[in-house]
Image (tube, coloured by chain):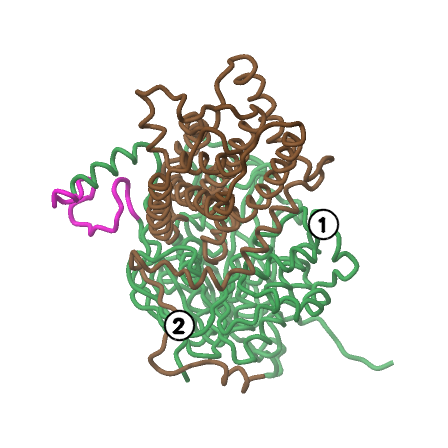
Chain colours: A brown, B green
Amino acid sequence: MKSTLKESLPLDKEHWNMIIEPRRNLLDLRLGDLWRARDLVMLFVWRDFVAYYKQTILGPLWYIIQPLLTTVVFTFIFGSVAKLPTGGLPQFLFYMSGTVVWSYFSACITKTADTFITNTQLFGKVYFPRLAVPVSILISNLITFAIQFGLFLAFMGYFAMRGSVLHPNWWMLMTPVLILMMAGLGLGFGIIISSLTTKYRDLRFLVTFGVQLLMYATPVILPISSFPERFRWIVLANPMTPIVETFRYAFLGGAGSVNLPNLAYSLGFMVAVVVIGTVIFNRVEATFMDTV
Amino acid sequence: MTTVISVENLSKAYRLGQIGTGTLSNDMKVWWARLRGKPNPFLKIGTADHGNRDGETIWALKDVSFTVEQGEALGIIGRNGAGKSTLLKILSRVTAPTEGCVKVKGRIASLLEVGTGFHPDLTGRENTYLNGAILGMSREDVRRKFDEIVSFAEVEKFIDTPVKRYSSGMYVRLAFAVAAHLDPEILAVDEVLAVGDAEFQKKCLGKMGEVAQEGRTVLFVSHNMVSVRSLCERGLLIESGKNTFSGGVDDVVNQYLNPANVQEKDDYSIQIGVEHREGNGKIRFREWWIEDEVLGKGRKVRSCNSCTFRINYESKPGEKLVNVSLTLTIKDNYGQPILSASSRFINSDFRLIPQSGTLSCHFDQFPLAPGTFIVHLYSSIQNEMVERITNAGTFEVIAEDVFGTGKGLESHHGKVVVKDFSWSIN
């Protein structure tokens, strides 16, 4: 045992495997560590999936009930009562497409925003690449998204059979890119907020509320053309707008269209937020135990 | 030998007091000042900028430097709050140091706690994989060692039961078993051995010793001098954030238990910090000494002879001291209790004692063998602890010709002496 151990150790005089210092380089993000922890990421995903619905009666059915009820309520209030325009699309499908996409983004952001607070106990006792937690949240929410997306496709089929005019098109192939962009935006904003909540707890309350408000500035309920001229710039500045619009157009067709410059704007926004978020997160990770 | 850990001028500052209220506006001011090239407006003059704004800062660690060789078992000893845990936290990368650095060769795994990340709803099997991954094992590593882990923890029958149904003993055993099979090149452990029943503690200690013998490096932080001594060959003493002494483990343990400042000539006062005094303080012990017929007043006593411990106390004016119970406990220099003389045992609690005075505890035959011992004092009033001092100072037991034969009483004969025994054959 002794000899094999010695052989396996690269113990030359000057080589240190790890140096623990007060402050790391801003751009030393240790993404290699994260890659080596991929087993851990997958176990976190699996733990969240298994543990979340343990001891519930309906179990994974909850994944379907939530968006379904939201869509029904939206259809009733905004469609039947308020009679808001949906650009000629069936109201139910219009709201559902918006809800399914939005709920992925909103789950990503609100759950990653709690990373440091909910894992204080764990982070305080053992080191592993902290980014493993937010990344695992993105992936486990992806499972939820896949189930809800399947539900959406099923309803699409049902409406098509009933004779609704739908125009699904080749933009559907963009779906993985759209998901990636939403995941990136959710992760970026989420880890920025989680980094700041270690010091300023107020943000915790702000985030759920803020995400809800942001939904009204995204064409989830209203098509972009129906927003009053004065406020349209807010909707256009919102990086989620092109994603929701593109998704809806790709699967349902109708009055909307795909605006490539707007999509490129969202992509750029996403990259910027992820980079800034990762840098801040890495910075906070080193000493958050002292301030949390 | 190769140096595998090199700690260089390591310091860690903590900010005292409330963190949170008003920090946003203060942070803005600090940031604004920095932007204009002005000094931090919240920093006190004469202190260096460590990123701390308001409130006092304390140095949990200050300029700690040491090295650890490969295959060495190093025991880190110190009182509560001395900075041991902070040191271990920095080594395990849970928090970053304020100044200085640590260089490490090889994979380091630290156990600040067992069972970190266990999820109550998951089964033992599932938690083993999860916990292993959190501690840095790959799924393949865990699969390979799974059977070994389960049999070490003795939970074979319950491995597919959610851990929330486990008894606390089973839970801790499984948690330790996972940690014990990590196989890192360097293992840093914090008091985790203080878990489970005595039998399992022994098993854990054995496992740790095994790890050390395999040529791995072990850093062991503990209050338990017996396990530190049996596990480590080198020791490091940390006092108020500084490493004050390092060397062979016996020397370091002695240094820790017998601080030189306690015993000065003709000064029998009890010198202790606030953290070493417990109880509501109705009675405060001030001094103690021993009176021996031959040696006189001092902190020396002859083995197996009569002697009297005298303890001087004070209390606040107007305090009513009724039904006072007193206990004198004597511990060896590893902190293990050897004997206790309590007024409670012999139904002689004090009905009423004055505001100050000297209490006496007499022994006809003081039954200890030569060596150094620690005095532990305890007092309670109506079952409520008023004063406890776990280390009130040490005294010396001087060798005597106890049996009148000139024989016996070497160190391997134990710590207690009895005279009234006989041998016979039937």
**Label 1: chain letter:** B
Front residue of this view, candidates A222 and B82 = A222
Viewer can see residue B293: no
Q: What residue lies at 72% left-to-right and 35% top-to-bottom?
A: A58
Q: Give the image location of residue B108, x and y in percent.
A: 47, 68
Circle 2: element type: loop
Q: Is residue B163 magenta?
A: no
Mark 2, other Cα within 10 Å: few <14 / some 14–19 / many ≥20: some
| Placement of the C terminus of chain A among the 4 image quadrants | top left
User: Residue at the right extreme?
Assistant: B426
A224 sits left or right of A154 in the view = left
Q: Are marks 2 and 1 on the same chain?
A: no
Label ID, residue A69: none
Q: State whether the magenta stretch is mostly helix, strand or loop.
A: loop
User: Residue at the left extreme?
Assistant: B37
User: Residue at the bottom extreme?
Assistant: A3
Label ID, residue A17: 2
Q: Give the image location of residue B135, x and y in percent.
A: 54, 61
* Residue type (three-letter) at the residue carrying disc 1: Pro
| Placement of the N terminus of chain A among the 4 image quadrants | bottom right
* Residue type (three-letter) at the residue carrying disc 2: Asn
- Which portion, as a residue range, is magenta? B34-57
Above-or-below relation of B106 to B84: below
Label ID, residue B162: 1
Q: How many marks?
A: 2
A198 sits left or right of B291 in the view = left
B313 sits left or right of B147 in the view = left
Front residue of this view, candidates A65 and B150 = A65
Q: Give the image location of residue B291, x and y in percent.
A: 48, 60
**Label 2: chain letter:** A
